Image (spheres, rainbow, N blue to C red):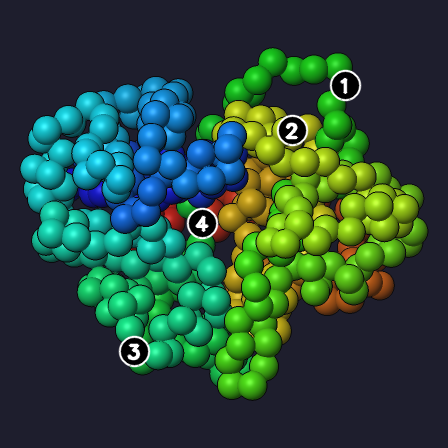
Amino acid sequence: MRILVTGLIGNYAFGGVTWDYLQYVLGFRDLGHDVWYLEDTATWAYDPVRQEPSADCSYNVNYLERVMHEFDLGDRWIYRNEATDTYHGPAGADSERVIREADVLVNVSGACWLRGATASVPRKLFVDGDPMFTHVGLTEPGKTRDHVLAHDEHLTFGLNVGLPGCKVPAAGIDWRPTVQPIAIEWWRKNLLPPTAEHVARDAWTTVMNWASYKPKRFEGEDYGQKDIEFLRFFDLPRHTGEKFVLAMGQGVGRNRPTEKLEQAGWKIIEPDIYLPDYATYHDFLANSKAEWSIAKNGYVKSRSGWFSCRSACYLALGKPVVVQDTGWSEHLPAGDGVLAFDDLEGAARAIADVAASYERHSAAAAAFAEKYFDAAKVCDDLIA
């Protein structure tokens, strides 16, 4: 079966973004399908050096080509440049034929804006990775809702969507829960040579943005970003004897309070400098002791059930995770290797538990990844 996976690997050539989409391709390939990666976003390419949209997609295409070759997908990718309406990649002039002959289109995070060729694929799946924020935008008529409804099936990382106690509006759509597929074998390889010193060594780490975009308002309430939740845990380092290193983007408005964070005991590093691509991102996680992380306020407040794709990558490395509960613990069992918290005291206790029994939690983390996030299993469930 020919499957198209759509994403933003080229347009947003950053480490975590690459893994978010690539692992779907790897999962479907492991199942034996004829899988292609397609990038057709209906937006201009983003130049990460100049930090602005660009009609020139050469940087993006070169990065995508490098990634595809690294993962033995060198002849299985298509990139369409919106600015010039041209296709790039091995298929060349045959790109639209390749697309039209597909059996399934897996539109991850809605990255592909359906056009003639993609709209003609017989089975189209919309995979939402941003519950509450995506869903609020679907409560009103308009192009966004029409676009999402043009898909045949709808899946979400919001494991609680449609269940009692969850404030995420289903918006009249039948949502099926799913999680991020993880290509576990790739997380157990060294993508960069080992180094004697590493900024993440012996540290609790995470990769995050202070605030990715402005809050969304729904039924008289605001649903915000990680900055809101982080304030509740600002003094966490003072409650533990652990080292914390956060690769944290400055976010919309560049309002990250860097000096105050470092005074409170957090070491802050810039993601675009320390982990600008898929290999350095992998290396940062692999050299970490464990992950500690909060979730977006909108995920927590809505009780969405979201579980981080990044946290799943830590687990594949055998790194324990202590992560804020959004309701995910009602579906994925919290315990050894994967610990949930709701408040400062709970976070400190969980960190102390992991530190006291690190080998047990590490082994449990690896087993958890294999059971719940293995790419082939997740992708098979996706198209079942």
Q: Nearer the viewer, mark 2 or mark 4?
A: 2
> Which residue is under mark 1?
197
* Screen quadrant of the C terminus: bottom left
Pair 3/1: label in front: 3
Name the residue: 63% across, 36% down.
Answer: 271
The residues tagged by marks 1 and 4 sit, at their Cα atoms, a distance apart of 31 Å
SS for dot 3: loop
What amino acid is found at the position of numbered circle 3 in the picture?
Answer: Pro
Give the mark, 2 or 1, whose residue is nearer the N terminus: 1
Please report whichever mark, 3 or 2, sits nearer to the chain's N-terminal start: 3
What type is the residue that disc 4 sits on? Gln
Q: Is residue 313 left or right of residue 94?
A: right
Q: Is residue 26 visible?
A: no
Alpha carbon separation for disc pair 2 and 4: 24 Å
Secondary structure category for the residue under label 1? loop
Secondary structure, mark 4, is loop
Query: What's the amino acid at mark 2?
Result: Tyr
The circle drawn on residue 141 is 3
Q: For mark 1, does the 10 Å Cα neighbourhood hold few (<14), some (14 to 19), or many (20 or more) residues?
A: few
Q: CA distance from mark 3 to mark 2?
A: 42 Å
Image location of residue 326, percent across then percent down: 60, 66
Graded by Cα atoms within 10 Å as few (under 14), some (14 to 19) or many (20 or more), the crowding at tag 2 reads some
Tag in front: 3 or 4: 3
Question: Mark 3 vs mark 4: which is more N-terminal?
Answer: 3
Q: Quadrant of residue 1?
A: top left
What whole-number distance in Å separates the C-alpha atoms at marks 2 and 1?
14 Å
